[in-house]
Image (cartoon, rainbow, N blue to C red):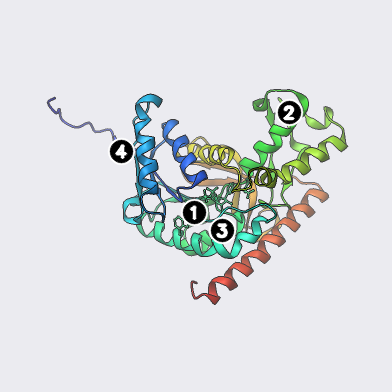
Amino acid sequence: MSDLPSSPVSCKSPRVTIVGAGRVGSTLAQRIAEKNLADVVLLDIVEGMPQGLALDLLEARGLELHNRQISGTNNYADTANSNIVVITAGFPRKPGMSRDDLLKINAKIVVEAAKNAIAHSPHAIFIVVTNPLDVMTYLTWQVTGLPRNQIMGMAGVLDSARFETFIALELGVLPADVKAMVLGSHGDLMVPLARYATVNGIPITELLDAEKIEQLVQRTRNGGAEIVELMHTGGAFFAPASATSLMVESILLNQSRLLPVAAYLQGEYGLNDVVIGVPCRLGCGGVESILELTLNDTEKAALQTSANSVSNNIKRAQEILSNIGDW
Ligand SMILES: NC(=O)C1=CN([C@@H]2O[C@H](COP(=O)(O)OP(=O)(O)OC[C@H]3O[C@@H](n4cnc5c(N)ncnc54)[C@H](O)[C@@H]3O)[C@@H](O)[C@H]2O)C=CC1
Ligand SMILES: O=C([O-])CC(=O)C(=O)O
């Protein structure tokens, strides 16, 4: 083949680094590559594992009809100049544990991952997945020093997809026709907004009685634990990877989707200096705006309770990190 002069159009592919090549991380790599969104770098502390996963995914490229580069590494230098860094590194919970029980063990891992990743990709947008989600997202914002639009956590898209699934199962309708928003923290105090849930525009309050809606709300709050209890070893990863890839897609393709995202608040919803799930417009700038929905008194109180719990856990995490001299 003979080379012709290069084109003025950039052929550079966007690059997404995934720190933590476990179940969520590796499934996310597959989703991003197979949706043809970006090249992917998988990084893990376990030697050989991300390299092996990357090779396996590369060997599927011809079959899945895409040509994205996928590499595995144990070295942050190989993640340089990523457009997006997703942090999934850390431990998943076991049956009987809450997500907050992971705070101590995962805080150190996430802080280290964020510091190392930003050193090589100073302009990246960070999406945090590791639990407890809202606290880990706050720590990432704090240690990277990035503006708040570049830091976000994935939880609301997943929790909303679960709420939508349970509504669709109850009504026997197509899940894609159900639209719902779950705000607040990613834990037992999350705030599913039943009042705003619809089936193709029809409020679910017209289709289901209050007792049934409350059952679906409770199942949503317990959605992660339901899977952890069934699986015994680790938690959900297919739907979490789909939810994260949706956020990656909205950013890379500048889609401006309005999604529930864990964001750093500065007065929105009357909340300050806390990360919590709120409706955000996601585009190439990351969190481009935060929508302040009108909430009734019950919803407002639930969001405040959720935020108070996250704030207390942020303080706990900061104390733990200063005690181990990692702050
Ligand atoms: N935000 C959400 O909605 C969801 C959050 N999660 C959370 O995501 C995290 C990952 O879950 P899974 O993938 O199922 O766990 P996993 O155990 O399959 O994978 C975690 C990976 O992190 C790696 N790791 C540990 N320390 C590291 C470090 N210092 N640097 C780089 N990599 C490191 C491990 O070697 C492992 O491969 C957990 O904390 C889990 O609770 C999971 C599902 C949904
Ligand atoms: O429940 C867990 O531990 C994992 C998670 O956050 C979820 O699936 O929502």
Q: Is residue 272 above or below residue 49?
A: below
* Amino acid bearing label 3: Met
x, y (%) of residue 275?
61, 56
Whether disc 4's CB lies below 8 Å from ligand 1 is answered no
Evaluate whether residue 197 shows in this view.
yes
Whether disc 1's CB lies below 8 Å from ligand 1 is answered yes
Depth check, mark 2 against mark 4: the one in front is 2
Q: Earlier in the sequence, mark 2 or mark 3?
A: 3
* Amino acid bearing label 4: Lys
Mark 3 element type: helix
x, y (%) of residue 318?
58, 70
Q: Residues within 10 Å of mark 4 (few under 14, many from 20)?
A: few
Q: Earlier in the sequence, mark 2 or mark 4?
A: 4
Residue under circle 2?
A: 169
x, y (%) of residue 260?
63, 43
Q: Earlier in the sequence, mark 3 or mark 1?
A: 1
